[in-house]
Image (cartoon, rainbow, N blue to C red):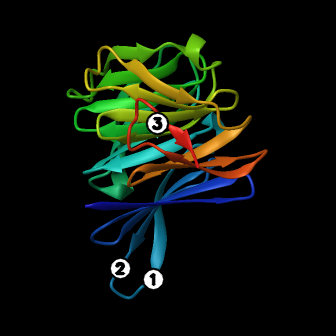
Amino acid sequence: MFIMKKSTKSIILVFIFISLPFLTIYFTGIELTFSYYNDTNSSYVVNGIDPANYPQDIYVASNFAFIAYGYKGLQIYDITAPEKRILIGNFSDGGWATHVWIKDNYAFVADRDDGLEILDITNKSNILKIGCYDNSFINKFISDFYYHDDKVFLVDYQNGLQIINVSNPALPVKISELYVSSYSYRVFIHNDYAVISCLSDGLCIINISNPFSTNNN
């Protein structure tokens, strides 16, 4: 089981994924590092990924690390043995991948040029694009998104919050939107609320108990 902690400090994002026993992955938006912790509480770096290619985001599920890798698209690494991580899959259609979320056999990838892409990762060595929420609706730049209950809650720098029904991954449909603030930056879902950080207005809390009619609290 993997536990994810996501924190922000200044402009550097830090993602920490912990798996029992003793494997931690640190991702700073600049560098990806695999560290191994032994029973004496000492640690050492066992592997890393070239930061020159600008890894943007990471999601860990089972023994796989899924990386939104900028112009390289989505890359999948087998990290069963962290000291011998293996690239087993890659998908790129020429855009710039910035965020990734894994649900069952699907990868949801925010692409700066193509919007929200939905990929079938059943065969991780043969990734298939099966759906896309067109970027013309989101001004080309998703700043963050959160998957919950067959819906993707996404924010972009200009439109605020949009809720996309992805129960049919091949046909994502927008069901609601709410302008929150210019420069909506991060989103987190908690119970019936979407909590959004806005660079201009601070913290915004949205009631999403009825996703077809959102309210700004």
Which quadrant holds the N terminus? bottom left
Mark 2 in CB contact with mark 3 (< 8 angstroms): no
- Name the residue at 45% across, 37% down: 100
Residue 92 image position (x, y, % from top left): 47, 19
Instruction: Give the quadrant of residue 161.
Output: top right
Mark 2 to mark 1: distance in Å?
6 Å
Q: Which residue is mark 1?
A: 42
The residue under the point 58% across, 34% down is: 155
Outermost residue, right side: 200
Instruction: Name the residue carrying label 3.
Output: 153
Q: Amino acid at mark 2?
A: Asn
Q: Amino acid at mark 3?
A: Phe
Which residue is at a point 59% across and 11% down the rendered structure image?
Answer: 136
Q: Which mark is residue 38?
A: 2
* 1 vs 3, front mark: 3
Which residue is painted at 63% across and 19% down in the image?
Answer: 140
175 with respect to 113 (left or right): left
Whether residue 65 appears in this view of the structure is: yes
| Image height of 171 relative to 64, above or below | above
Q: Position of residue 24 (x, y in %)?
A: 42, 65
Labelled pair 1, 3 in contact (Cβ < 8 Å) = no
Secondary structure at badge 2 equals: loop
Which-is-in-front pick, marks 2 and 3?
Answer: 3
Q: Is residue 168 left or right of residue 8?
A: left
Asked whether the beta carbons under mark 2 and mark 1 sit within 8 Å of each other, the answer is yes
Residue 15's spot in the image, x, y percent?
52, 56
The crowding category of the residue bearing disc 2, from other C-alpha atoms within 10 Å (few below 14, some 14 to 19, many at least 20), is few
Q: Earlier in the sequence, mark 2 or mark 3?
A: 2
